[in-house]
Image (tube, grey):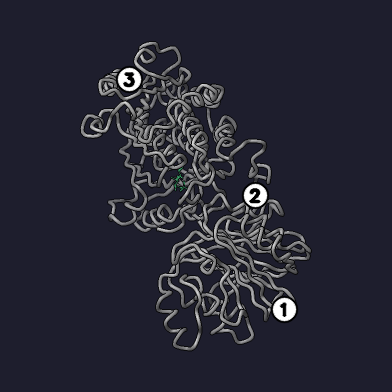
Amino acid sequence: MCGIVGYIGDRSNVLNVLMDGLRRLEYRGYDSAGVAGIVNGEIDVYKEPGKVANLDQLVHIENDVVFQKVGIAHTRWATHGPPNQMNAHPHFDQDKEFCAVHNGIIENYATLKNQLQKKGHIFHTQTDSEVIPVLVKEFYDGDLFSAVTAALRQIVGTYGIALVSKHEPNKIIVARKGSPIVIGVGTDETVIASDVAAVVKHTNNVIYLDDGDVAEVSVDNIEIRNLDAVPVSRKVDKVDWDIASAEKGGFEHFMLKEIYEQPDSIKNAIRGRLNFEQGTAILSGLNMTPGELTEIERVIITACGTSMHAGMVAEYYFEDLAHILTDVDQAAEFRYRNPIVNNKCLVIPISQSGETADTLAALREAHMKGAKVSGLVNAVGSTIAREAGRGVYLHAGPEISVASTKAFTCQVTVLLMMALKFARSHRMPMPVGKTIANEIQKIPDYVQQVIERSGEIEKIAKKWCKCHDWFFIGRSYLYPTALEGALKLKEISYLHAEGYNAAELKHGPIALLTEDVPVVALANDIDGKDKVLSNMQECKARKAPLIATATEGDQEVADLTDDIIWIPKCHPLVSPVPTAVALQLLSYYVAKELGCSIDQPRNLAKSVTVE
Ligand code: M6R
């Protein structure tokens, strides 16, 4: 969704820092972009609909813009008003004294706008965000910080903002409520952003603002206060990845790079977390004694999209291994349906970005209802990670492509370790635990073997990519994997794909099968495989082309299908991981063949920070 970058310091190329930051935020999804800086004491603003490249053309080729010392920039994902030049950020008051970029939604903007118009202020855009600089102008009385806090006190809704003024050109004011702001602390310079990806090129030392924080940032000083101007202290954290992790490194797309990274990212997720002697997992972030673990009577996993699919795999893990009643709630449902939760319940919000609005709200609801909460998050320092209070990081490294890949496989792997830990403190005998721990250790190798089959998968993708409708079917652990396979295909190739439990097909969807509708059947060697084979026969009888994933060498499946993707022989519990990788590759090559914008699919945002 929207992205913010700001810079203050002594560099002569402020604009380049801003443009580079915007490019690093492109992956979040956006539809227009803009920059503003102070030139000879006046605010200068440039904005364009479409890609950052359009803005680049405007500022560098058409206008040869130079900003001195300070600037702010934005990528907008339209909510209020269409994505055009006027509605793009930065926004400013009618006299261009104050200029702001905003992420989030101002719910009472219509009322505020109306009041301000009555006082003679003129508005130019259809956005909610424009009220911010206008409110600041209304309150300005020689002290920018006070004017901003007075303005923010009027606002109902969420915001991450950066604001500059021609009256106090040596500072940027940033503030946060519900939309992240990170301050990168350099030497004699500060880079602010909504996402560390735009900061790590310049510094690894960062301050994450908390909700309610307002910071006044100058070249050599950062002062953070709350909305009542009371000073607050925030620690400086270290980002543990560098700029190379956020670049393509020779791959054509981030998605492919991230698929290929999975053997390593899973190794990182596992590292130091398996106890082979005891056949259990060590997850210190969970911060629960074996006694506390046995007190948990119910697990609720709450998440959206791909993270929810990982949670659905884990539902099987927790129930099969630890015999704990487990439910998966789509996070938006959890927050609104008044779920029955108590202190014997462990709620696990799962999120790659750690910023998904619905998942964050579900987490807050769980806290409010007295549940124990433990987050499973990739982005270190993100809001969900911090608000969960305790939890486990994925350590998958930054995921840039909108289509989530390595986060899913790491989530499933870590959730399996969590279930193992619970199971061992409940009833699972040590030898069983040892077998599972050993299998988890082998996951990176299984994934590597699938990646080595990329060429074969690419051929299958080329053969079927012209088909407009697809089904993905599976059972047991591979049912959520089928849902994930369908989600991957639809989001990056824009083909219509549906994921179903293989058993469900005959209850309606089978009516859609024809010789132009491929069915991807997950027919690996796990419990229920024979049933999946029967379901595949049913599809074949309706002339649907069959593509299957199957355990290496399984001739029975091979005989039934048009095309087959071999998955290495592995324990059924871990099979969702290599199978998901095969489906990621299938989607990737279909989308590539169709010439789609793989890393930034239309209409999508990497982190969904609105409801
Ligand atoms: O950052 P999160 O894991 O909370 O994101 C949840 C979904 O928005 C995300 O998984 C989305 O479905 C991806 N685009 C799927 O590839």
Residue marked by disc 3: 529
Residue 197, percent from left and from top: 62, 51
Which of the marked residues, 1 or 2, is nearer the chain's N terminus?
1
Q: What residue is shown at x 29% (from left), y 21% (from top)?
A: 540
Disc 1 marks a residue whose amino acid type is Gly
Residue 217, percent from left and from top: 67, 69
Vertical arrangement, residue 380 with respect to residue 214, above or below: above
Residue 451, percent from left and from top: 55, 25
Disc 3 marks a residue whose amino acid type is Lys
Asked whether 320 or 609 is in front, the reply is: 609
Crowding at label 3, few (<14), some or many (≥20) Cα neighbours within 10 Å?
some
Query: Whole-Å distance between the Cαs marked 2 and 3?
Result: 44 Å
Disc 2 marks a residue whose amino acid type is Val
Q: Nearer the viewer, mark 3 or mark 1?
A: 1
Residue marked by disc 1: 41
Crowding at label 1, few (<14), some or many (≥20) Cα neighbours within 10 Å?
some
Which of the marked residues, 2 or 3, is nearer the chain's N terminus?
2
Asked whether 555 or 517 is in front, the reply is: 517
Residue marked by disc 2: 239
